[in-house]
Amino acid sequence: APKTVLITGCSSGIGLALAVKMARDKQKRFKVIATMRNLGKRGCLEAAAGVTLNKTLEIRQLDVCDERSIISCINSIPNRHVDILINNAGVGMIGPIECQTIEEMKGVMETNFFGVVRMIKEVLPDMKRRRSGHIVVISSVMGLQGIMFNDIYTASKFAVEGFCESLVIQALKFNIFISLIEPGPVVTEFETKVYEDAENADYSTTDPETADMFTNLYLKNSKAIFSSLGQTPNDIAEVKGLAGVVISAAKPPFRHQTNPVYTPMTALKHADPTGALMTDTFYKMVFNGHVPTEPDTNPIWLHFIGCPLHKLYPKEQGEGEMKKHGLLAGG
Ligand code: NAD
């Protein structure tokens, strides 16, 4: 029988691509329950689903911030049987913390962290009883490494990572797998929404130097990075990505980074437990002139990742450590 897959946040982006990819599986291995907070936004998914609609793909309402909507969605599934839960719904937030209210910050945690917790709490007891199941969480490389002006978003993804890292061992005892997916930039509405918010924000609540750092340095670089290194939702969903490497694996990996270009960045903190290698690298990248002059030429990340990281350091300081940890490969 096909496996029942429940995905959150399917009205756009990665969730939509993944729902359609799995519903269109040639071997018909999946029955997809594609959920979204607002059914009024089902148009794009319906169009992309095509002939699979109401066959291998069903659309249901589910708001990860509303326990009642979660329970009623799960209860609507025969025997509440979910084989694979994919926690995809998420929101972004960028900017100086002085310009964000605690309420706004809590909103990000509510969706990105407690949303995942609510979903897992609801399906875990059934999975335990059946002694089978797979829980997938769309985290981010920012679940592994903090990035300037993404303080709260990063914290929400770190929270998810810590939660899953704790839970996975208990889950394995019940034959339940947990997988964290860690994409780098992906070109979706996510990006559009955070830039729109950033453009409409009021920066008078922070000092002019910070405001300038955010609007000129950060936003410009960030856009350049998205256009040069960004993956598409289909890249994430495809055979060599989430659908293939993680969901169809006999023993799904606990972590999967979708963009290998970012792996060295996430390894810096492990190469030097004092944190100096990581903080120095980022400081130099951001403030010491490694800044793109044109949108898609020479973005700082390419400088960092594609070109020799050790050039940012006196040889003796970083090179040995980085070699030891394979960070200079190809550099
Ligand atoms: P997106 O904005 O297109 O998709 C996010 C979806 O979550 C939207 O459809 C939105 O309506 C939905 N959502 C938000 N709050 C919800 C709620 N309370 N209940 C149900 N649904 C809700 O962006 P995306 O890039 O496809 O994001 C999907 C996931 O990927 C997110 O968890 C995001 O953090 C993660 N991610 C994105 C990027 C990126 O660069 N786009 C990078 C790494 C990780």
Image (cartoon, rainbow, N blue to C red):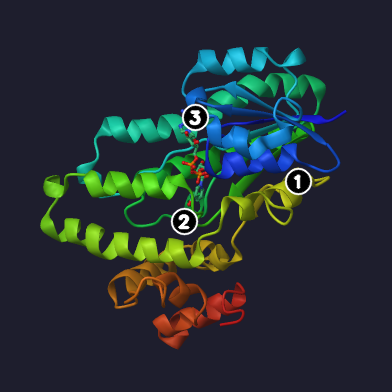
- Sequence order check, earlier mark of 2 and 1: 2
Residue at x 75%, y 23% (from the top left corner) = 128
Report whether the residue tagged 3 is closer than 8 Å to ligand 1: yes
Q: Is residue 198 left or right of residue 264?
A: left
Query: Hey, what amino acid is under mark 2?
Result: Gln
Q: Position of residue 74 (x, y in %)?
A: 65, 17
Closer to viewer: mark 3 or mark 2 = 3
The C terminus is located in which quarter? bottom right
Q: Amino acid at mark 1?
A: Pro
The residue at the far bottom in this view is 315
Question: Which of 311/243 is in front?
Answer: 243
- Tell me the tag on residue 145: 2
Residue type at mark 3?
Answer: Lys
Mark 1 sits on what residue?
A: 252
Mark 1 secondary-structure assignment: loop
Q: Are marks 3 and 1 in contact (CB under 8 Å)?
A: no
Quarter-of-image position of residue 176: top right
Find the distance from the CA under tag 2 to the CA under tag 1.
Answer: 23 Å
Give the class, few, some or many, for how many residues have Cα within 10 Å of label 1's Cα (few <14, many ≥20): some
The x, y position of residue 111, in whole percent, is 45, 31
Q: Secondary structure at mark 2?
A: loop
Using the image, tell me which numbered label, if any, was put on residue 41.
3
Badge 2: residue crowd in 10 Å (few <14, some 14–19, many ≥20): some
